[in-house]
Image (spheres, rainbow, N blue to C red):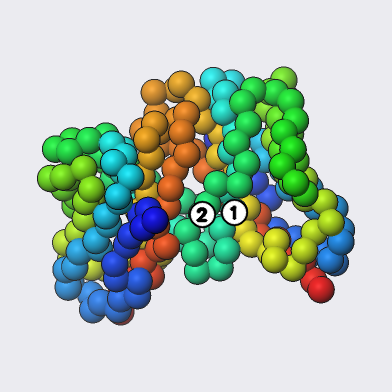
Amino acid sequence: NAGVTQTPKFQVLKTGQSMTLQCAQDMNHEYMSWYRQDPGMGLRLIHYSVGAGITDQGEVPNGYNVSRSTTEDFPLRLLSAAPSQTSVYFCASSPNLERGTIYFGEGSWLTVV
Amino acid sequence: QKEVEQDPGPLSVPEGAIVSLNCTYSNSAFQYFMWYRQYSRKGPELLMYTYSSGNKEDGRFTAQVDKSSKYISLFIRDSQPSDSATYLCAPGGDTGRRALTFGSGTRLQVQP
């Protein structure tokens, strides 16, 4: 049972570099999302998708880009990394957002120097 | 004021203690109430799921919801060192939201 798989688990970037955090789920869930988790701030929604080809912004979308070409994959792109994007990133999927369980990946630890 | 308020802790208790973790919320549209547990360097995982007011028990864990006061609690009986984690409350419902609203989490440490 793979569930939600995120890669890489750890990454160090220099300011201005770009990178993509990968997320894949094998549960055929329509809903997928990306959160960032910072101390004292809880989980904050970056972007989400309710199905292939449909994405929308969450609470803190600036500096991030997403696409959803398949049901399984939902990559998160950092366009030009900034130190403020140092955080832990979680990808999540759900069969039914508000009535169902949200399944999280293991997290990606990103440091921007 | 945040929509979901949760004491950040840390809460440190001796092994075997009864632990009470609490959240308050402001949106009366919430109907489903979830508790997630997050171990260090791991993603959150669903621990308890309750609907509307009342209690739900699962082993050593009891989730309690009081919709009239917008107060949700998680009780852990006979706490174990393996219960040391961050606990996040997450109310939900047919609010047309884009995502669940999570509390900021309470860090629990159970000392052996």
- In the image, which disc is placed on residue B37? 1
Marks 2 and 1 sit apart, C-alpha to C-alpha, by: 5 Å
Question: What residue is at 57 percent from the left and 23 percent from the top?
Answer: B31
Does B79 sit above or below residue A81? above
Q: Please indicate whether residue B38 sits to the left or right of residue B7 in the image.
A: left
Does A41 sit above or below residue A58? below
| Residue found farthest to the front | A1
- In the image, which disc is placed on residue B44? 2
Question: What residue is at 35 percent from the left and 71 percent from the top?
Answer: A9
Q: Earlier in the sequence, mark 2 or mark 1?
A: 1
Q: Please indicate whether residue B63 sits to the left or right of residue A30 in the image.
A: right
- Secondary structure, mark 2, is loop
The answer to whether residue B105 is seen in the rendering is no
Question: What residue is at 64 percent from the left and 62 percent from the top?
Answer: B85
Task: Characterize the local packing of mark 1: few (<14), some (14-19) or many (20 or more) Cα atoms within 10 angstroms.
Answer: many
| Residue B11 found in image quarter | bottom right
What count of labels does the image hold?
A: 2
| Residue B81 found in image quarter | bottom right
Question: What residue is at 70 percent from the left and 61 percent from the top?
Answer: B83
Q: Chain of mark 2?
A: B
